[in-house]
Image (cartoon, coloured by chain):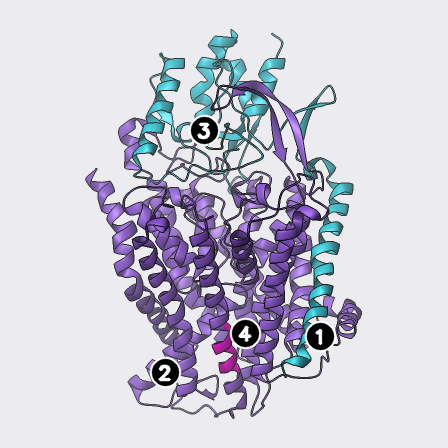
Chain colours: A cyan, B purple
Amino acid sequence: MFKEQIKPAILSFLILTIITGVLYPLVVTGIAKVFFPKQANGSLIYRNQKPIGSSLIGQPFDNPKYFWGRPSATSPVAFNASASSGSNLGPLNSALAETITNRIKLYKAADPNNTAPVPVDLVTSSASGLDPHISLAAAFYQISRVARHRNLSQDTVKKIVLQHTKGRLMAIIGEPVVNVLEVNLELDEYKK
Amino acid sequence: MNWFNLVQTAIFLSALLLLVKPLGIYMALVYEGKPAGLNVWLAPVERWIYRLSFIKPDMSMSWKTYAAAVMLFNIIGIIVVYALQRLQAYLFLNPMSIPAVPPDLAFNTAVSFATNTNWQSYGGETTLSYLTQMLALTVQNFVSAATGMAILAALIRGFVQKQVETIGNFWVDLVRSTIYVLIPLALILSLILVSQGVVQTFKSSAKVALLQPTKDADGKIISEQTLALGPAASQVAIKQLGTNGGGFFNVNSAHPYENPTALSNFLETLAILLIPAALCYTFGFMVRDRRQGWAILAAMLIIFIPCLLSCIYFEQKGNPLFDRLGVDQNATALQPGGNMEGKEARFGVTSSAVWATATTAASNGSVNSMHDSYMPLGGLIPMWLMQLGEVIFGGVGSGLYGMIAFVIIAVFIAGLMIGRTPEYLGKKIESYEMKMASLMILIPPILVLVGTAVSVVLPQAKQAIFNPGTHGFSEILYAFSSTANNNGSAFAGLSTNNFFYNLTLGLVMFFARYWLVIPILAIAGSLSRKKVVPATQGTLPTHTPLFILFLVMVVLIVGALTFFPALALGPIVEHLMLGGG
């Protein structure tokens, strides 16, 4: 009863391994290469043939002339895209309160005239530590600071923010978000 | 709660329900060996696999032979996954030169993937070579799911057949589940995911310049970012569809390269529940009484929907601490608001909470947000859904056979109450079936509670806790709830990559899967042998709202009574502390 099953077990395991573990990923890779080469390779952004980032992976910013993204809990450096990680801080952990207090201080110090409360996504770590996006509220909160440091009008900065905003899918699903790296690249390239 | 919370949830559930019938019929035809389109086209492949592996497709097995085949196939799987991890440094497709995985971690990962749990003690991009990801993990993602579906098909045959000693051929059920159901769906899903930006390449990684150079913890200037790439889309598709859940990257589907857009997220969430929900219809179709399939699906939804809405509610309400610190967490047109710690901006609260509920109702265990950072009651929902025994959708195949065990218990209790011989679908439920069903319902809670109790007294187990206080207890309770129900999600603060947890959680996953497989196959064998009792006026109908509600109550009472004390010590106390400041 048991012995007769050994041969089918080993052989079917081998064949299914080849089908699902070799052929299947190779077929997907092949089709992806032909139809979606950019997406399959990481949605990289190029300037002068050099990759300068990915539109899907956030980068760290703390210069006041740039928009700042979601806080990142990766180590040893923020936005370490070879070791994704969240903070895993529990809601009552005093370390969470402390971290958030410090982040609020940074925003207040960089923009003392802005008295609005800081939008929640600017002071809470993202799940991946690589979140490329912030909410519209988080972007609008930073417009006055960025505009001042770049000697641009707030309207100009807002226009650039909106250009890199993605709305909901069919106006319903997901959340509208601003791509931080794309906005910052555009700001650097903007000619008055 | 706001308008977007509700509409997004409604659209998600409608899309799921629309797909239940077509996919359910298709799978039923596949298991019955009747023409259903794809299985006509691919029939030569099926025959070719049988010929090459010396499988005699017409030979039906006794339940014991069937169980032996299941165990043999799974043990081969565990050995191969273990060996590939230990040897990956000497094999090819290892562009990052990742060393061999240590023995305890390799054991844990091997059991984790063979049992359809996909508990992640490893960090995907840092621990495993591409060869291991493909030949070990992707393969198990398919065949562990197909194993669950095969066992369900055998159980259904137990209800359909009359006075037969056999329950079908495991190899046939396994091969058909893989090539006719899982591969086609995974192929479609993975290509849509690539179009959205999920990576699929054999390049090791890409290096890009940082727009603004930054400093690491030691003050060293970092001006480059290394983007881990890999053949992710093909694995993400099947880990969602097969209720596996093991991520290509460490943070699973929170990683923008695993789940980049609202559309990818919608489809990945749908894929979690798709097959488990459709199998309910398959069940009704195969027992020639579709109402029975809808009844079970209704019972699942009656528990699932309130859980889903509560989870959204608690996360949307946010953390009172944030209010005190002067953080704006109100939902407005410009931001989703709510508790955003450990969540991605593109998903916000709704898509994160829908995922968290779906992934724990089904035994998927993939995540798109960090459950450890959920509000106490927001995090209680996923934990409790697992503790219910992974029968609210549950794993592909395993969820429904677990639910049928609950149906057997419910029919039996109802039979005692009204003084009639319990029957289900024309088969008498007797003490043998009851004993086996009781085993299935008792084993996971015992593993959860004993495992947690032992861990909270052992110093080396307590060291692994990340968050202090009662939340730390929740981390351990969550880990055992997840592994003892083959889910695989985690309160990831707990550092489980050490000898104690790799070993204990590995054993828990093993027993939780295979100690349930054997009793359910025994039930299938025993039912097959029985004759069909014609329905009379005295037969308890099992498709009525009354019975559905009764089934829900049985599931809830068992789940609630078993785990309330433990939950009270964890998330409930934490919630009360939140109010008290």
Residue A153 as seen in the image, left or right of residue B44: left
Q: Amino acid at mark 2?
A: Phe
Q: Nearer the viewer, residue B468 or A114?
A: B468
The picture places residue B326, in percent across and down from the top left corner, at 30, 26
Say whether residue B43 is left or right of residue B507: right
- Residue B245 location in percent, x, y? 54, 53
* Apparent side of residue B458 relative to residue B173 in the rendered image (left or right): left
Residue nearest the viewer, comparing A75 with A110: A75
- Name which of mark 2 and mark 4 comes first in the sequence: 4
Q: Residue at x 58, y 89 (%)?
A: B165
The span shown in magenta is: B517-524
CB-based contact (under 8 Å), mark 1 and mark 2: no
Question: Marks 1/4: CA distance?
Answer: 31 Å
**x%, y% of residue B156?**
55, 78
Q: Label 1: few (<14), some or many (≥20) within 10 Å?
A: few
Count the marks. Answer: 4
Distance from the alpha carbon under mark 3 to that under mark 1: 54 Å
Task: Give the distance between the C-alpha atoms of the residues marked 2 and 3, in whole angstroms.
Answer: 54 Å
Kind of residue at badge 1? Lys
Q: Amino acid at mark 3?
A: Pro
Q: Which mark is residue A71?
A: 3
B266 is higher (above) or lower (below) than B532: above
Q: Which residue is mark 4?
A: B283
Q: Main secondary structure of the magenta part?
A: helix
For label 2, the residue is B412
Secondary element under disc 2, as helix, strand or loop, is helix
Please identify, in this view, whether the residue under mark 1 or under mark 2 is nearer the observer.
Answer: 1
Q: Quadrant of the N terminus of chain A?
A: bottom right
